[in-house]
Amino acid sequence: MSEVNRPVRVVLDQQDGPAFEPQRRGAVLRSLLEGGYSVTVTGEQRSVSPLDDAELVVLRELDAGSDHDAEATQGGLPVHFRGVAGLDEAAVLEVVEAQGAGRQAADWKPWFPVIDYDRCTNCMQCLSFCLFGVYDVDDEKQIDVANPDKCKTNCPACSRVCPEVAILFPKYKNGPINGDIVQAEDVDREKMKTDISSLLGGDIYSLLRQRHERASSRFSKERDESRALKERKRCLAKLQQNLDIPAEVLDELPSAEAILEKAAAASKSR
Amino acid sequence: MTATQSEQRRIVYCHCAYARVVKPEVKQVVLDGLANSGVAFDAVPDLCELAARQDPALERLAAGDGPVDVVACYPRAVKWLFHAAGASLPEDGVTIHNMRTDPAEETLAEVLGAASEPQEVSA
């Protein structure tokens, strides 16, 4: 996930100095946004969001490094005024970063589930299903995305097991998982697809437990590990296809022991 | 800044910088259009990333006075992203424009058009 040193808000100020030439304004703005900065453009006819705890870097179309550059405070927070006339967009980005406002552009694609609480019934299927600890319950026993950064990029599997189509991934390619309107047929399809009982033949943890026991018993008798591996691969391929799980996510699945521990913990918490 | 002019609409633009789900040409037309229009607005790199980090900027964006046009993606996604960050958008006065589905010129015209009326977020 990206690192932020402190909240920073860049302001392209056109009220207390010459206006940025329109094309340049767009280029500078794009560069700042792609560098990971929130930007407020001052202008006419509209309001902007109010001041908050964010430190301000105010950029003006005045000579760089001139007397116009100044430091101030507002509400106890630093305000850095900088002239950027004549600087290209990369140099403007450097000016912002030089104020100690450095932050990395995200090296993590912001991929995580977002719950539509208008649809969620708190059934906890997602909590039971996700093996990476993304979900938890809050103090009011409501399902919550407690660890979004544990989510596996491009894996929408939990949304496919949600019977109410209540889990969104805004950056997913298709609706309704991407936030598009949920149609009746979507609900039917997801229910059919994601009824874990029908997909995997019963409660997933009980099934895993049984499989583990059967496998242990069989392995101890037969010692046929290659056969077991083949079977595991076949099952995972089926799961991958049904739930649109990226292959690399399957590679990161926890061990059978870890899954069983999680199952035991989940049973206790209910 | 004109932050205290409570009667005026606000514009919040999301650049969706960390994925390719919004076509670059759509973002370019909308962003350049806003930049060239001379109106004031707020722009953020990526609402999803802000929400994942629970960035206080979302509170600021949700909390301003007056109606707001959010230029981003699907309304249901935007609504619950703000909620996920503990910065729910107000019930009234929020119009969400979807750059994933709507033509750029249409979006821009709606956002900049004086006729744009506030409406509730609908999922």
Image (cartoon, coloured by chain):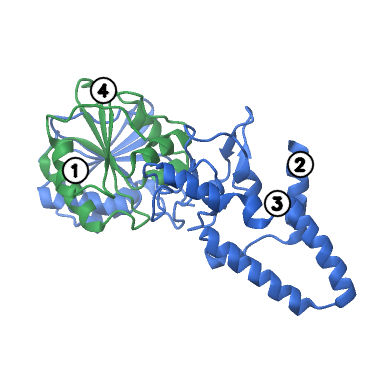
Chain colours: A blue, B green
Q: Residues within 10 Å of mark 1 (few under 14, many from 20)?
A: many
Q: Tell me: A124 left or right of B41.
A: right
Check whether the beta carbons of the residues at disc 3 and disc 2 lie within 8 A of each other.
Answer: no
Q: Which residue is nearer to you in this view: A86 or A127?
A: A127
Mark 3 chain: A
Residue A75 vertical placement versus B28 (above, below): above
Q: Measured from the top left, where is residue B80 in percent x and y?
A: 43, 36
Check whether the beta carbons of the residues at disc 4 and disc 2 lie within 8 A of each other.
Answer: no
Foreground: disc 4 or disc 2? 2
Q: Distance of mark 4 from mark 3, alpha carbons?
A: 52 Å
Mark 4 chain: B
For disc 4, the marked residue is B66
For disc 1, the marked residue is B107
Q: Measured from the top left, where is residue A206 in percent x and y?
A: 76, 51
Q: Residues within 10 Å of mark 2 (few under 14, many from 20)?
A: few
The single residue placed furthest to the right in the displayed view is A221
Q: Distance of mark 1 from mark 3, alpha carbons?
A: 48 Å
Disc assigned to residue A202: 3
Q: Are marks 1 and 3 on the same chain?
A: no
For disc 2, the marked residue is A267
Amino acid under disc 4: Gly
